[in-house]
Amino acid sequence: MIFATNRGVCSIRGTDIQSAHGIPVDLLDRLLIIRTYPYTQPEMKAILKILASTEGLAIDEAALDALSHLGAKTSLRYIVQLLTPAAILARTNGKPHIGTDEIEDCAKLFMDSKSSAKLLAEHKEGYLY
């Protein structure tokens, strides 16, 4: 069984008990914890290049650079999710490959999870809670 979490010390769901990662202490004692680190920008670029090749997507080197730079500020998950809409946008515009224009346009259309959470927190009075 693999657990992936970044919750820190918080309440165990359904209780008032505080524990690391929100996991009950008796279960936590039996886990092997492997710390992971964020991908570097060159690693993200390499992953995107492999993914684009696997998916049959043509993408400029400059667009890969733009995506990996954006990924360093956001996440690998976010930039991977931008590939499909960028490819659709490039195809719609009659371009044979994804360029930096498509990356910039898609980044304006879609938010990463951190930006979304920040926006919601800033405007929480406007939402049902």
Image (cartoon, rainbow, N blue to C red):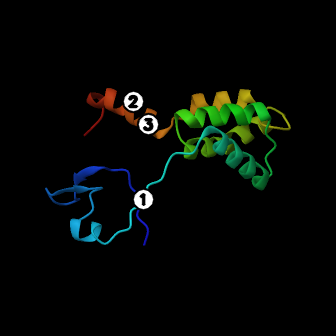
The residue closer to the viewer here, 94 or 31, is 31
The residue closer to the viewer here, 2 or 53, is 2
Residue at the image point whose x is 84% and y is 34% from the top: 94
Whether residue 116 sits left or right of residue 13 in the image: it is: right
Which secondary structure lies at badge 3?
Answer: helix
Which secondary structure lies at badge 2?
Answer: helix
Q: Provide residue 101's location: percent of width, then percent of height.
A: 72, 26
The residue indicated by pointer 1 is 4
Q: Where 33 sits versus 6, above or below?
A: below
Whether residue 13 sits left or right of residue 110 in the image: it is: left
Give the position of the C terminus as an image quadrant: top left
N-terminal of the pair, mark 3 or mark 2, is 3
Disc 3 versus disc 1: nearer the observer: 1
- The picture quadrant where one finds residue 68 is top right
- The picture quadrant where one finds residue 11 is bottom left
Q: Where 98 sits versus 27, above or below?
A: above
Q: Provide residue 27's location: percent of width, then percent of height.
A: 27, 70
The residue indicated by pointer 3 is 114
Q: Amino acid at mark 2?
A: Leu
Is the C-beta separation of discs 1 and 2 under 8 Å? no
